[in-house]
Amino acid sequence: MKNVKSWDVIIIGGGIIGLSLSLTLRKKDASVLVVERGEPGREASHAAGGMLVDCLIETPATLQTLATASAKMYPEFALELELEAGMKVDLRDFGTILFPSLDHIRHPQLKIASLNFAHLLEQEPALHPLDQRREAFFLKERSIDPRAVTHAAWHTAKNRSVDFSSGDAVTAINLSDGRISGVTTTKTSFLAEKVVNCAGAWSGQIGPHSIPTRPVKGQMLCLAMHPRDLLKHVIRTPKVYLIPRSDGRLLVGATVEEAGFDKRTDPDTIQRLYRAALELVPQLRNAKILEDWAGLRPGTPDALPILGATPTPGYFVATGHFRDGILLAPITAKIMADLITGTDPGLDLAPFRLARFSSPSS
């Protein structure tokens, strides 16, 4: 039996992208239903590291404008969630210490402060003495706890009367006279004149258009630091990155693997990451491994997100954020909410349109 209730917008996918979009749409008085195949926030958002990377030498040039705009939005975005959800999201503003590769050092746009040995020793005395003597750079970046910010976004969405359907995957996009009319799921159907595909690595499994996303596996682990403030900065090297949390946890990551939808962790890989962390910070040798996991990032052929309208009236896509889903959530929500409600987002979205993957003859 079909559901007779209708919404202004249905969002497919309850990760940080879908949740953030639902919040912005509610600010524009749109009624919103989020349809999530599993549990909201438990896929790529739950597995992410939370580095808000806004760096000329690591962010694709095409993505830099969006990355910088979103990074600037984060303090207000995080505070809004904390106040409305009544929980901390651990937005940290200590910055990143980058031990660059040779390619990084030679990058023509490297305009970041170099750290001398004495300054590095003062900033992070727990680093291995040899690493303290390597060339390092300071980046004015933030980090956030992805699980906390996603959970806060979910609570805030519920507070703002966003509706949810969980554990029920979308199987089809419904059309009426060539326009969107809603979605069909494994259990029922829902009505809406606008639908947004925010299904991450699963976006390509939903028609009517070919969306070239794929899962890109990333394995990580979490250690308990002793003392709790053993590290202050995010530490990034070509081999591994370390992300300290305010509660004394330390995330160690991450791999980039083409492994389909396989989310299993590999003990040898986890140990390799652990050893790489020990090489950087010898005091971690007695740290307890609290958890390890693997997540599936939504990759695209050109490593850029897919944002905007599709050829089907009322059908939009916001997916393929790869490793930047947490970072790009605020700006993606603004852009997509503007497009859905007929407002000019004020940004050039041509590089992110779905049409870039269409052949000239199609």
Image: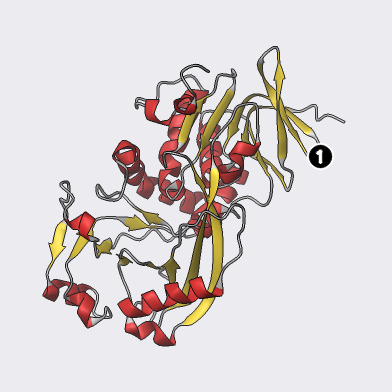
Foreground of the two, 264 or 285: 264
Task: Residue 259: name its quadrant.
Answer: bottom right
Residue 74 position in % (x across, y down):
37, 47
Q: Which residue is mark 1?
A: 187
Identify the residue at image location x=31%, y=59%: 93
Q: Residue furthest right?
A: 1
Q: Nearer the viewer, residue 186 or 189?
A: 186
Q: Residue at x 35, y 61 (%)?
A: 92
What residue type is disc 1 on? Answer: Lys
- What crowding class fits label 1: few (fewer than 14 Cα within 10 Å), some (14-19), or many (20 or more)? few
Q: Residue at x 48, y 28 (%)?
A: 357
> Where 130 falls versus 334 (above or below)?
below
* Residue 230 as seen in the image, left or right of residue 341: left
Residue at far bottom of view: 286
Query: In the image, is 178 to the left or to the right of 20?
Result: right
Judging from the image, the colouring scheme is: secondary structure
SS at mark 1 in the image: loop
On the rendered structure, is 268 left or right of 232?
Answer: right
Q: Is residue 247 visible?
A: no
Give the x, y percent position of residue 360.
46, 18
Residue 315 visible (yes or no): yes
Instruction: Give the position of the N terminus as an image quadrant.
Output: top right
Q: Position of residue 316 (x, y in %)?
A: 55, 27
The answer to whether residue 30 is above or below residue 214 is above
Q: Could you tell me which residue is drawn at 41 percent across and 68 percent down?
A: 245
